[in-house]
Image (spheres, rainbow, N blue to C red):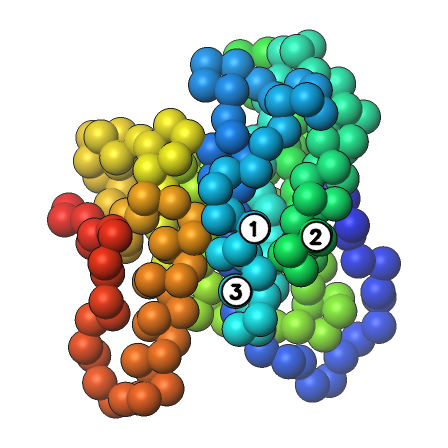
Amino acid sequence: MTQGKSQVSDSYSVMTKVKVLFLDRDGTIIYDKLGGYISTLEQVSMLPRADDGIALAKSAGYKIVIITNQAGIAKGIVTEPRVIEINEYMQRMLREKNAEYDLIYYSPYHPHYPKPEFEKFALWRKPETGMVDEAIKDLAAEGFEVDRSQSYFIGDKQVDVACGINAGLHPILVLTGYAEQSQCILRQTPPEYIAPDLYDAIANYILAKDVLAKDAPVSHAAADTTGGAAMQP
């Protein structure tokens, strides 16, 4: 489901290409309640430097889109209005650092807790790409064409990496939250880069790559990966 969805319906003859960071929420931007679900505002706490990293990306011209599975809704652990409230609270926190997101999507669906009203969101649950596809469609309605070759999916779980791969994005795993590096190996979904946190992923990998590309557009030299590492298949 969507918050902040564009209402623009005009047809654009000229599209502006944009780069997008698709970001997981819990365990990537805010602390996750491992083994549970964030269900109160009191549980919402920004991970160190996450907001600073997002602010850097926005300054570099990236659109910020949050993509989050929220199966706690289907399980009856958290209500949909509370999820929306938590998202808006996080947005206010991010805004203090000029790091607010552009769009946010959440999937309430869970296959083991079927609810007729949520069945239409089955393909939104990561690692499916429904939320990414919807975001790309919504950005297109605003006149923006997402350049998948220059866009990234960042998260702490294997499903985030798999979603990025399935959507044709550059997948990055962060070692905050669940840090599912072993699951990525087990399921043969290697991330392009493994970062200690979101800030490192953005500052020391993504933006470093951008600088290299500008300085040497025909070079294939690797970016400085201090703090993180490329994962071997």
From the viewer's perspective, tell me whether residue 40 is left or right of residue 173.
Answer: right
Question: Residue 6, relative to residue 221: is it above or below?
Answer: above
**Amino acid type of the residue tagged 3 in the rendering:** Leu
Task: State if disc 1 and disc 3 touch (CB < 8 Å).
Answer: no
Alpha-carbon span between mark 1 and mark 2: 9 Å
Q: Nearer the viewer, residue 66 or 56?
A: 56
- Element type at mark 2: loop
Report x, y in % for residue 132.
56, 50
Report x, y in % for residue 134.
65, 51
Question: Residue 196, relative to residue 168: is it above or below?
Answer: above
The earlier-in-sequence mark between 1 and 2 is: 1
Q: Nearer the viewer, mark 3 or mark 2?
A: 2
Alpha-carbon span between mark 3 and mark 2: 14 Å
Dot 1 alpha-carbon crowd within 10 angstroms: few under 14, some 14 to 19, many 20 or more: many
Task: State if disc 2 and disc 1 touch (CB < 8 Å).
Answer: yes
From the viewer's perspective, tell me whether residue 129 is left or right of residue 188.
Answer: right
User: Which quadrant would the N terminus be assigned to in this image?
Assistant: top right
- Element type at mark 1: helix
Alpha-carbon span between mark 3 and mark 1: 9 Å
**Amino acid type of the residue tagged 2 in the rendering:** Glu
- Element type at mark 3: helix
Circle 3 is placed at which residue position? Answer: 56
Report x, y in % for residue 89.
74, 37
Q: Which residue lies at the image location 53% right of the left edge and 55% below the top edge?
A: 52
Q: Nearer the viewer, residue 32 or 217?
A: 32
Q: Which residue lies at the image location 45% right of the left edge and 18% below the top edge?
A: 34
Is residue 50 visible to us here? Answer: yes
Circle 2 is placed at which residue position? Answer: 96
Circle 1 is placed at which residue position? Answer: 51
The earlier-in-sequence mark between 3 and 2 is: 3
